[in-house]
Image (cartoon, grey):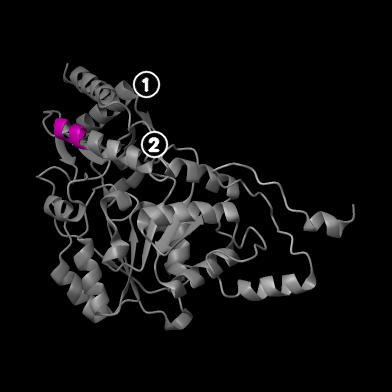
Amino acid sequence: MNSKTFKDMKRKEVNSSRMPVYRDAGFELYDALTTENAFRKETEHNREPDLYIYSRYRNPTVVSAEEEIMKLEGSGWALLTQSGMSAIDTALSVFQHGKATRPWMFFTEIYGGTISFVESVLKSRRGLDIQYFAPENQEYDLVKFENEIVVLKPEIVYIETISNPMLIVSDVRNIIAIAKKYGTNVIIDNTFSTPWLCNPLADGADIVIHSATKYFSGHGNLTAGVLCGNDNKIMQSAIEYRKFVGHVLSPDDAYRLQTQIQSFELRFSRQCSNASKLAEYLDRQPLIKTVWFPGLKNHPTHSIAEKLFGNKGFGAMITFDFDGKNKTEKRNRRDRFIELVSEKIKLIPTLGDPHTILMPVEAVWGSKYPEPGMIRLSVGFEEYAELYTTVATALNKLKS
């Protein structure tokens, strides 16, 4: 059998309902004319190419997983990357235009890794003009925000829907409206709220980012990031940047992510429900000084969360602080609690896992949140009775 006959044969179709894993580094282009056409079309940076060329450009398994996220977001496009940080890098780089780049504004209450990236890469290496906007009493003053927008005229505003770890809910709709009024682009990290609770693209955001490692995957066994949007020019620029720096997700991880996304809404709605019940319980405990959870009426941004999220929930993260006569007693209570729950609630530096996990805030964030008794809980979708028993038993032992 000569090669031409072999190439012209139709492959037998397999009756699978899933996109297979295409591990091809490069894809066959057959002849010079086809190759020329493929590379010419590649410069258009379409979301799904007519002919795949190289997996660093685009890969059919990755594109298929992106389409599942597009359904969740209701977006015109989605681009998967190897991590949340690479999604952030890709999204931000779309708006970098050399010396013509206007200042960028970041809200201060965002993921610590993002702040480190801003300081180490955007400021120190790329020389960008970075400005920060801070909350007052754990709430953003939008009158002050608009005044600063008018003076600064920033290229972009970058916010998180629910901040990490204090769980400040941003008034996303009004922030977007103010920014757009003055021609500022808006990037929103929606990881903590997910499209289940909030859809900033529908309110006019330019790009929404997720660490897909967290709730989209939800099983703590892969890392991935995604950026979503509706503007075709932004998509084309993001595809080009992702291709040149090699940020595309691997086909194996894309395949696994696509299967895990199928249960996203079931998982996340259960996590939100568990978190609401646990936050209410913790808020009544005498050993605990403060509980930060947007679903509690005493949270500074509770009313904003109610308007933004409706009745679906308030996220699956809880931060709380042990009471004590001094820092030593607070720290001791924190450490003893971590020890008492360790069989069921592990100390793991991530979030969104199937089972509840925790992180000691002071140990991770240091001087930014120096209270030694603070713990951040990422609530899982285990049976609530199991979670309650674990936490209640530990607190009862601490009392005694």
The residue type indicated by label 1 comes to: Glu
**Which of the labelled discs sits on residue 353, or is there none?**
2
Q: Is residue 33 left or right of residue 113?
A: right
Magenta stretch: helix, strand or loop mostly? helix
Q: Position of residue 390 (x, y in %)?
A: 27, 22
Residue placed furthest toward the bottom? 100
Q: Is residue 27 above or below residue 42?
A: above
Residue 2 is covered by the magenta coloring: no
Q: Nearer the viewer, residue 92 or 151?
A: 92
* Residue name at image x 42 percent, y 57 percent: 70
Question: On the image, numbered disc 1 is attached to which residue?
Answer: 343
Mark 1 surroundings within 10 Å by alpha-carbon count, few (fewer than 14), some (14 through 19), many (20 or more): few
Q: Is residue 278 magenta?
A: yes
Q: Residue at x 48, y 49 (%)?
A: 224
Badge 2, how many Cα within 10 Å: few under 14, some, many 20+?
many
Q: Is residue 331 visible?
A: yes
Magenta segment boundaries in residue numbering: 276-281
- In the rendering, at what x and y percent does residue 178 appear? 21, 73
Residue at the image position 23 percent from the left and 62 percent from the top: 172
Amino acid type, mark 2 = Asp
Residue under the point 32% across and 41% down: 268
